[in-house]
Image: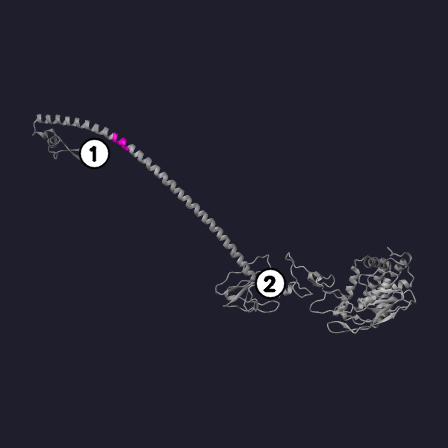
Amino acid sequence: MIGWLTKILKGSSDEERYNWRYEDDRTWDAPRHSAEGSDGFDKDEIACAVAVSLSEIDQKGKKVIDDKSEMEEESDEDERDTKGHVDDEDDRYAEVHVEREDDIYAKAHAEEEDDQYANVRREEDQERAKVQLEEDEQLARAIQESLNVESPPRYDHGGLFSPHPFFSAGYRICAGCNAEIGHGRYLSCIGAVWHPECFRCHACNQPINDYEFSVSGNHPFHKSCYKELNHPKCDVCKKFIPTNPAGLIEYRAHPYWMQKYCPSHERDGTRRCCSCERMEPTDAKYLSLDDGRKLCLECLDSAIMDTHECQPLYLEIREFYEGLNMELEQHVPILLVERQALNEAMEGEKNGHHHLPETRGLCLSEEQTVTTVSRRPRIGTGYQFVDMITEPYRLTRRCEVTAILILYGLPRLLTGCILSHEMMHAWLRLKGYPNLSPEVEEGICQVLAYMWLDSEIYAASGSDAASSSSSSSSSSTVSSSSTSSKKGKRSAFEKKLGGFFKHQIESDTSTAYGEGFRQGNRAVNKYGLKRTLDHIRMTGNFPV
């Protein structure tokens, strides 16, 4: 019906048009419809067609409304489906997002741990490399084989060595021969570069081929040469002094001679010289005396071995006393004896005197017979004295002093020191001094022995100065007596030996010989020798 009606309404649409104008002044020609074009149809048919058309339109409208309702219901269901789908999508997205964030965090955490571990490993590698570099620089044994230019050596400015100029490979100058090294093998040590054959020990001048070496004063040394020069050696066994349990080098040293030795030698029976007290080294044998004493070769050089040899020294000391206005009118016999004879004579003395543990001289006042050494012994095999001749000597009492006994085999200066001491005992007795305390009598005798040693040392050095321990008045007399004495040339060792004997007197710790000497020496320095002796005669004590 609609199609039919359409056919009716078509008409002749090409004859006239309506003009429609739009805002942009464009014109659109629309066809013009007219009822007049339907002259070929009946009006009733047209009316019937219109009615049927309206009926169809009404039915169609109802259908559209129903369709619309159904479409709205379907749209609501679609919306619910869409909403559920969206919720499911959101849940899946949230789960995926959480899993992705977890993966990202785990990955970042693992990367952070890897970075930390890598940093620790890198720091450890750098520290090991630094230590290795410092060892290489200290040991200086980095042999360069390549021709690449090496980096300048690193230095700590607070260290031992100062920086050395760094030159390129074409200007490497050997620190040994000052010649250009050029290409080839070379050493980079202690801030310089060297030809291998020019890197030599500063001690033996031989090339250093060892991996380790020592440095002192910016000079290289073989470790053995450095130890030989710097590690203390025992002067007795000639070995390097060992370390104690604490790892320290421990040794003993003589307070005057500074002879260093292992502490074990104080317990292993190592012998000492009976004169200078130095220990016997393994490379220099000491001579053995008949009484068991040991004598070093230096002390033997000036040793007085028999009574006859001692007489010139006795005359010199008498002159020394005369120079001090202390002349001995009586002639007192001087005898050299062995240790056993000296001990026996000391036991036969009625008047007890204070003596050192090792008695080396004795002033006798009793009649007795002693055995004296009448002829010098000779040195036999095994560094032993042989063929010593002794003879008995009968002492008779003509005065308060019968004889002075001195131990044989001692150096001239020590024999003279002992003789000066014992002669002072004789002088005190012969001059009628009362019985004195050991501190006063032994002390003033040590002062006279010290003064004689001092005069001998000054005379040996060509000086006319007197002893510093005497007063100005006694100094002039000592000087005159020293120059008038018959003294030969003294060796350097003998001069040093005289200093040692003085040191022994000064540092003696005994009450009688040590403290007595120091009190007497202070009194003589303050009041002079004569006034001190006068005070002793009157009071029996040193003046204060």
- Residue 338 placement, left or right of 18: right
Above/below status of 419 relative to 247: below
Q: Nearer the viewer, mark 1 or mark 2?
A: 2
Give the vertical position of 464 relative to 120 (above or below). below
- Residue 360 in percent (x, y) is at 81, 65
- Look at the image and give the residue range highlighted in magenta: 73-78
Q: Secondary structure at mark 1?
A: strand
- Quadrant for the N terminus in the image: top left
Question: Mark 1 sits on what residue?
Answer: 21
Q: Residue at x 78, y 64 (%)?
A: 501
User: Is there CB contact under 8 Å for labels 1 and 2?
Assistant: no
Q: Which mark is residue 215?
A: 2
The three-letter amino acid code for the residue at tag 1 is Arg
Question: Would residue 456 be visible to someone looking at this image?
Answer: no
> What is the number of callouts on the image?
2
**Badge 2 amino acid:** Val
The residue drawn where x is 46% and y is 49% is 115
Q: Position of residue 68 (x, y in %)?
A: 23, 29
Name the magenta segment's main secondary structure.
Answer: helix
C-alpha span from label 1 to label 2: 114 Å
Q: Secondary structure at mark 2?
A: strand
Q: Quadrant of residue 254?
A: bottom right
Residue nearest the observer in this picture, 438 or 375? 375
Q: Quadrant of residue 460?
A: bottom right
The C terminus lies in quadrant: bottom right
